[in-house]
Image: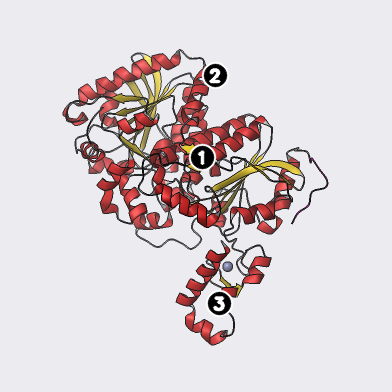
Amino acid sequence: MSNMTATQHLEIIREKNRPTVNDYIPAIFNHFTEFHGDRHYGDDAAIMAGIATLNSTPVTVIAQVKGRNLEENKKSNFSMPHPEGYRKALRLAYQAEKFHRPVICFVDTPGAFCGVEAEKRGQGEAIAKNIAEFMTLKTPVISVVLGEGGSGGALALAVCDELAMLEHALYSVISPRGFASILWKDPSREKEAADLMKITADDLYNFGVCDKIIPEPVGGAHTDPAQTADNISEYLISAVERLSKLDIPTLLDNRYKKFRKIGVFSE
Amino acid sequence: MLEDLFKMVKDRFNEEQKDEAEASAPEIPKDLLFKCPRCQNVFYMDEFEKRKKTCPVCNYHARLSAKERLDITVDKDSFKPFDENMVSLNPIGFPDYEKKIKGMQDNTGLKDAVVTGECTIRGYRAVIGIMDSNFMMASMGSVVGEKITRAFEYATEHKLPVILFTASGGARMQEGIISLMQMAKTSGAVKRHSDAGGLYITVLTDPTTGGVTASFASLGDIILAEPKVLVGFAGRRVIQDTIKQKLPDDFQTAEFLLESGFVDAIADRRSMRKTLSNILRLHNYKKIGANWQHG
Ligand SMILES: [Zn+2]
């Protein structure tokens, strides 16, 4: 258990040099081969997807791309996917199912992109479809939240058998800024919102949303990206091995129940 | 609901139409008028009511309470509610959330933002869910998520079709991550119902947005929308702030979605019972009684 506040975590994940999937993929996987496009509309650089080996096991990798600088961020739209990004992810997920490859998703987004074209091409439908289809995808699915995971735009890559979070990662219904803006009409109260929202890895572990907290080096992932990549890799190898032992009906039943049980009410 | 509507009309009228109203119709009590939020025309309330709260000029379908919707949709005395006493708790300890819920319950007579149950529509049995935007903009928290999920699970078990009238401002912020997870929970139940061969008809009503659009509202086998209603993922203001330009008037309307390919048909409220029962008939659901009544 860490004694840090959400705001302190937020400061660490906003570190300029915090590693992204562009650092992690080469460090964790071998033979990564990127595949583009949703086969309907276009290719969205906010989501990178392809196949690779993880400790010699073929896997499908689907990742939200946070840029390491302005240029990368312009290309990946600050990691805010359009519908075609989610549809590319789903296409690759179906392909993984067909060829019996486990799927590994990396979540790192403030949310799905909000814009005219995104609406016109069905942002809501694209996210909804991913959520529903990943629920019954007949192959293991593991999601890792690397930095921030915000709203349905994150959930579209986080319907999984196991959800892991890096120690300082945050996962929330909406970004703290959006939360402050909606509830208090004041986005500058972002930090206050972050501390209120219960969005740290520990909080989510306690809610049963997060299954595993992956430790980061002291001070955060940026202080030792190679060590962080090793920690992620070690977890992924064990999770793939663990989940691959389950027969598919059991896997899917467990996945359904993982989400089915979440809710706090009385009657 | 009705009081709200009167108030809304009165406020708008007072603000925007004061001079005109005083000049043209000084003898009409303002409470008897409805101003359409889409085309801005003003009508007698009884005319609007007679048309089941649709606009005589542009056919905008105004918001209904769950009770009003139930009354105009299901066969008389056929509705059997599910989970009537389910209430939200406060999973993230959001300040004053319990008080807010209590206030909403007192104002609306509802326990939370969705009513679910079993009914018949022109003799056809169906599981029905109706979201009510009077209750915290029908945002989805644990209760909405759980009731919708149970409704689908019941329908799957009993081989019944599901009809949902959606309306929502999105996920319920006050329940934090728990509300986000309701999107996965409900979508999972929809998927199981679908995989079991069950029919699910979505009727998009004013307004359907956010996390509800990005989950069960977009997953119907058949998606209908009432005329001129607002449907979208992101809020209009958020998009406007992002792109820094004015959005076209028809942006995120039912008609915009039809044109973009995301709804099957625009369905008029006044023939909704026929539309729905016809779809049920075409899916080989059997009538369970010829003696249904309506109204
Ligand atoms: Zn009108």
Q: Is disc 3 in the same subunit as disc 1? A: yes
Quadrant containing the C terminus of chain B in the rendered view: bottom right
State whether label 2 is within 8 Å of ligand 1: no
Identify which residue is drawn at 36% across, 56% down. Answer: B243
Ligand 1 is in which quadrant of the figure? bottom right
**Could you tell me which secondary element the residue under label 3 belongs to?**
helix
Identify which residue is drawn at 58% across, 61% down. Answer: B62
Query: Marks 2 and 3, Cα distance to the nearest angstrom?
Result: 62 Å
The majority secondary structure of the magenta stretch comes to loop
Query: Marks 2 and 1, Cα distance to the nearest angstrom?
Result: 24 Å
The disc numbered 1 marks a residue on which chain? B
Left or right: B228 with respect to A169? right
Residue type of the residue flagged with mark 2: Pro
Whether residue B218 appears in this view of the structure is: yes
Q: Is B54 located above or below residue A193 in the figure?
A: below
Residue, disc 3: B30
Residue type of the residue flagged with mark 3: Lys
- Could you say which disc has been placed on residue A46 in the image? none
User: Which percent across, then down, holds residue A38?
Assistant: 46, 36
Query: Marks 3 and 1, Cα distance to the nearest angstrom?
Result: 40 Å
Quadrant containing the N terminus of chain B in the rendered view: bottom right
**Could you tell me which secondary element the residue under label 2 belongs to?**
helix
The disc numbered 2 marks a residue on which chain? A
The disc numbered 3 marks a residue on which chain? B
- Mark 2 touching mark 3, by CB under 8 A? no
Residue, disc 1: B145
Left or right: A68 with respect to B285? left
In front of the other: B59 or A101: B59
Identify which residue is drawn at 55% across, 57% down. Answer: B229
Residue, disc 2: A249
Q: Residue furthest bottom?
A: B23
Magenta residues, as a range?
B288-295
